[in-house]
Amino acid sequence: MGQAVNLLSVENVTRQYDDVGGEALPVLRGVSFTLDAGQSLAILGASGSGKSTLLNIVGGLDLPDAGRVVLDGHTLAEHDAEALARVRNEQVGFVFQLHHLLPQCTVLENVLVPALVRGRAAADAAVARAQQLLEQVGLAERLSHRPAQLSGGERQRVAVVRALINEPKLLLADEPTGALDHAHAVQLVELLLELVVEQNVALVMVTHAADLAARCDRVCHLRGGAFVDGAA
Ligand SMILES: Nc1ncnc2c1ncn2[C@@H]1O[C@H](COP(=O)(O)OP(=O)(O)O)[C@@H](O)[C@H]1O
Ligand SMILES: [Mg+2]
């Protein structure tokens, strides 16, 4: 029918956890949204509202009980484990609250890890892109530093570059500024939004800071397991 297809389509996703007592804990009760390349969406919600659960499902780290996630025309749940791992590595970039950089590796080596997963040749081919992106985020002089030699803001910028190294279509950030002071948090979000446009990726950013969320193209509030309108 010539219908436009969104890069990301999250359709009526539900997820519940099994409690120790055998009772089900419904966390997501039917969440839907779409997102296109070059667009940013912020998800706001209180602690425990299911933001990480949702982001993990969107990134294929977890599967929904019902509903589906369609990325670039493919339903994630239809991939076998190997194909899903490849989608996560090649099409999705993850940034977390804690940088998860390897302490014994340099900045450049850390950034190349997701490329190395695809083989030595892929990592070699990604060196120029790594250097260019690190320069762009202001870390040109830090390529040989270890994570312990960097500030918190610098470490998160390395994590952002690592997430982008394989030229993903989708960037998922789970409270990426949670460990930063406000000034550095604003800087990191500005940088993310610049890169979203320049690299033409779609960004879903989870945060509990309304002022940071407001910088994104769209803001959704997660409450009671669903997106609600208005203030959280
Ligand atoms: N693996 C799990 N098993 C059982 N309960 C979980 C699990 N992960 C998260 N939860 C519960 O689900 C709810 C949502 O968690 P989460 O998605 O981490 O929220 P948020 O990221 O918004 O803080 C919380 O009540 C949490 O305790
Ligand atoms: Mg969380």
Image: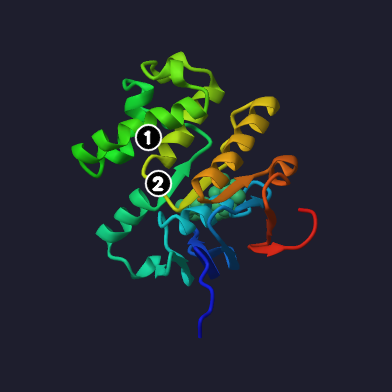
**For the residue labelled by badge 1, is the local secondary structure a helix, a strand or a loop?**
helix
Q: Which residue is mark 2?
A: 167
> Looking at the image, do the residues carrying marks 2 and 1 touch, with CB atoms under 8 Å apart?
yes
Q: Residues within 10 Å of mark 2 (few under 14, many from 20)?
A: many
* Residue 22, above or below 177: below
Residue 86 is left or right of residue 181, and the answer is left
Residue type beneath disc 1: Arg
Pick whichever of labels 2 and 1 is earlier in the sequence.
Answer: 1
Residue 164 is left or right of residue 48, and the answer is left
* Residue 109, above or below 46: above
State which quadrant residue 228 falls in.
Answer: bottom right
Figure colour scheme: rainbow
Residue 21, position as x, y percentages in the image: 50, 60
Residue 121, position as x, y percentages in the image: 20, 39
- Closer to us: 150 or 228: 150
Camera sees residue 175: no
Residue 177 is left or right of residue 124, and the answer is right
- Closer to us: 182 or 222: 182
Specify the farthest residue to the left: 120
Residue type beneath disc 2: Glu
Q: Which residue is mark 1?
A: 129
* Residue 94, above or below 11: above
